[in-house]
């Protein structure tokens, strides 16, 4: 490895000292630190560092370190296009299922990454196509595709098909189509199932459905999921891809979701598995007894 790309959340001022230390640590190991332009401003180092716009950093780096929360890592995943370089997420956010590595774990994990002996997951991605008045908007997503009503809109009606077969008409605030990685994001908050990242599956979860019998559905990731919007007056509907891209829907617009050929190589901290992450992030197994 010769070049390590570094991207931090643009307003993450508290990451400055960590970035300064990281640049020096990489230089001592003869690895070029290529910082995203706004990240370089946060570092405040007197040492001259290589810097570029985010898309250029992603295109040139042999691996990436992302500092921030899951939203920052999702933004980077949309820049990767078809590059499958290792991505190491350092958590400066509030939860961090994707940016799971704590600051004190950064250098042991990074050492393994540089030496080529690191643990990682290949996170499956989804391919989404929103067809609006005959025009297709496309994106690969790591977490989810969300179709939802605007704040002041009424309940929306959506027809859902899997492999061309009609599943149901959902009357709800919206619908989430989630990858296994995204199952611990909005899908989990909406009452959807937690899927292990290795599962070849997609979760379909209604948001606040009008019928209490509407429940999340899990299908294989070789399926084609189509969501058709039923025409309605005075209803504003949007579709978002990973919370990074969004489009308005109307009339009889539709959204199709399939498995993407892409995946994201997400670096894990040594000796930590998916269940350890769940226990840590969701506080499973902790005593509820209040100490005196």
Image (tube, grey):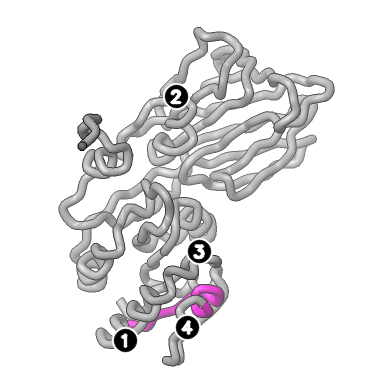
Question: Earlier along the polypeptide chain: callout 2 or callout 1?
Answer: 1
Question: Earlier along the polypeptide chain: callout 3 or callout 4?
Answer: 3
- Whether residue 208 is visible, yes or no, is yes
C-alpha gap between disc 3 and disc 4: 15 Å
Q: Position of residue 231 (x, y in %)?
A: 78, 20
Rendered image: mark on residue 44: 4
Left or right: 259, with 25 as reference point:
right
In the rendered view of the protein, which quadrant contains the N terminus? Answer: bottom left
Q: Which residue is mark 3?
A: 9
Rendered image: mark on residue 27: 1
- Please give the name of the residue rendered at 50% of the width and 76% of the height, measured from the top-left corner: 42
Question: Earlier along the polypeptide chain: callout 1 or callout 3?
Answer: 3
**In terms of secondary structure, where does tag 3 sit?**
loop
- Quarter of the image for residue 198 reads top left
Label 2 Cα crowd, 10 Å radius (few <14 / some 14-19 / many 20+): some
Q: Position of residue 59 (x, y in %)?
A: 49, 70
C-alpha gap between disc 4 and disc 1: 16 Å
C-alpha gap between disc 2 and disc 1: 46 Å
Question: What range is drawn magenta here?
Answer: 31-41
Question: Earlier along the polypeptide chain: callout 4 or callout 2?
Answer: 4
Q: Position of residue 253 (x, y in %)?
A: 73, 30
C-alpha gap between disc 1 and disc 3: 22 Å
Q: Which residue is mark 2?
A: 191
């Amino acid at each position: 490895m010769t070049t390590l790309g570094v991207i931090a959340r643009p307003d993450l001022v508290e990451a400055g000292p960590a970035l300064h230390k990281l640049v020096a640590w990489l230089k001592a190991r003869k690895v070029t630190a290529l910082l995203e332009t706004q990240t370089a401003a946060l570092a405040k180092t007197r040492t001259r560092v290589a810097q570029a716009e985010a898309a250029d950093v992603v295109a040139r780096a042999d691996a990436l370190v992302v500092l921030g929360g899951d939203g920052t890592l999702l933004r980077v995943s949309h820049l990767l296009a078809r590059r499958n370089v290792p991505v190491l997420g350092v958590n400066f956010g509030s939860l961090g299922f994707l940016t799971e590595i704590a600051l004190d774990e950064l250098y042991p994990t990074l050492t393994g990454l540089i030496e080529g002996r690191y643990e990682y997951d290949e996170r499956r991605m989804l391919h989404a196509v929103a067809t609006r008045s005959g025009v297709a908007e496309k994106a690969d997503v790591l977490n989810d595709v969300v179709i939802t009503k605007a704040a002041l809109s009424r309940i929306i009606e959506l027809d859902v098909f899997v492999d061309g077969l009609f599943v149901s008409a959902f009357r709800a605030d919206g619908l989430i189509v989630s990858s296994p990685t995204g199952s611990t994001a909005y899908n989990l908050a909406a009452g959807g199932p937690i899927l292990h990242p290795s599962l070849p599956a997609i979760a379909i979860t209604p948001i606040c459905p009008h019928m209490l019998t509407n429940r999340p559905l899990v299908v294989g990731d070789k399926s084609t999921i189509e969501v058709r919007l039923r025409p309605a007056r005075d209803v504003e509907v949007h579709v978002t891809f990973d919370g990074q891209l969004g489009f308005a829907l109307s009339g009889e617009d539709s959204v199709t979701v399939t498995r993407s050929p892409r995946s994201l190589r997400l670096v894990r901290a040594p000796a930590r598995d998916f269940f350890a992450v769940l226990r840590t992030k969701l506080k499973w197994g902790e005593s509820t007894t209040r100490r005196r």
